[in-house]
Image: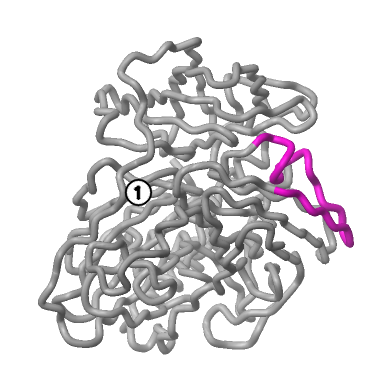
Amino acid sequence: MRYYSRRQFLAASFATASLSLPIKSMASAMTPLYIPPLLEIGRGKPLYLTLQPTETSFEGGKKVTVWGFNDHYLGPTIRVRRGDFVRINYRNNLPEAVSLNIQGLLADGASPSGMGRELPPKSVWSPVVSITQNPATCWYHADTIGRSAYQTYRGLCGLWLIEERRSSKGAKNNPFLLPHQYGINDIPLILQDMSLNYAGKQLINLDKNSFYGNKLFVNGCYNSFMNVPRGWVRLRLLNGSISRIYHLRFSDQRQMLKIATGQDFLPKPQTLTELTLAPGERAEVLVNFNQGDKVYLLGGNTGSLWEQAKTFFGIGHQPESNRLVEFRPEGVATVFDTVPQAPAPAELPHLAINIKQNRRFVLDTENALINQRRFDSNRIDISASLNSFERWIITADRAVGFYLQGAKFMVEKQRGKVLDLTQQSWQDTVLIDGETEILVRFTHRSTNSYPFLFGVTDLLLADKGCLGMLVVS
């Protein structure tokens, strides 16, 4: 049982009373949802990313200093095509060293980023990345050992989209195409939770093993709305929170069609009324706004007023509101209401797979350990063979996200339930809630100097050592 001091009890009681006020007296005016700028990168065209302090206003008040890319809080959405090669020009204008990870990008360990490529202040680095993988919704974020939670929370993250070259072509009014008008019917949603002080500045306790903010944000906006056209809209979802697991649903219980994970399209859309995303996990869904009025995307359920008050003081998990963003359909309902067709996944695992090795992992989130060991930058934890398959069996003492760099996997079994691989697609991030078995395929090389990382996606836990290093040769 957890005990609270008299001061904590009185403070929480006051907060509970405040939270019981009518919503209109508590809520600030709704603001339009910010859409990160889109950078289309063609063959050989350089991509410039400057890491720097900038300013933003989280709740419509006074601007505060944050971190970001190219003078924006959060980074631009970067879109590349399969077959491209991209020269990335990083410049670090921040006061501390930063490593960056493009999670979901399949490339050799030495090429894109990662712990072996730390950028000191005032430094530049220009890697060239070859894009060879299937369409994917990746994300880039701070991956600095011991500082990834703080730097990502401050604003160092953004979406990185990989598409087929043909996906931008075709008949302009073909209703069977997936929605592809960025910021109109193809909408990026970066989900975050934060706590702010009286001046609107970000608060985070780095001493704990997890962090749960008392307010939910989308693309850096609180209490926001988005005007959307009638018909089908594509949402590209990223859980950019430090620790929070989202159970997403709509306020009117409307269905959504999950069409893709972070790594590829699904063989067949999955009809859902709730979608769970671990930190760092991505998904694409289609939502039909042809009928009905405004509707909220919700980030789970709100707890009791007491639970909300505990979160306010850093001792609970429940946000003060579960509303993420309000969608406001506009225009005339379309008569032609056909479901857009997602492309088939480019590859599925063969029925006969040679499993080279079985491995077991126990994630101890209480002590930030994997198999009773804490991260050591001088130790390689796993050596795997290029183009091989392995089966990893993972358990954890609480629900937590798990990820791999430079490789991909399919979930074979969760909580004893065998899953049909023909109805799934590749992933690089998964929620571990009970025993989970994954089929891992190693498609790219890494070295002792530039290893891949694996471990929990809770960035505070990762900073405390719940990570390992992987070499593929």
Could you tell me which secondary element the residue under label 1 belongs to?
A: strand
Residue shown at 71% from the left, 62% from the top: 46
Whole-percent x, y for residue 51 in the image: 75, 64
From this viewpoint, which residue is outermost toward the left?
335
Left or right, residue 404 beside residue 286: right
Q: Is residue 255 above or below residue 200?
A: above
Whole-percent x, y for residue 208 in the image: 61, 47
Whole-percent x, y for residue 3 in the image: 49, 47
Q: Quadrant of the C terminus?
A: top right
What range is drawn magenta here? Answer: 108-128
Residue type at tag 1:
Ala
Residue shown at 17% from the left, 86% from the top: 332
Left or right, residue 137 beside residue 249: right
Q: Is residue 288 above or below residue 184?
A: above
Which residue is tagged 1? 260
Res 427 seen here = yes
Res 458 seen here = no
Q: Quadrant of the N terminus?
A: top left
Q: Is residue 268 above or below residue 158?
A: above
From this viewpoint, which residue is outermost toward the right?
122
Residue closer to the observer: 327 or 445: 445
Residue closer to the observer: 1 or 236: 236
Residue closer to the observer: 185 or 173: 173
Task: Tell me the colour scheme of the image.
Answer: one colour
Residue shown at 20% from the left, 55% from the top: 273
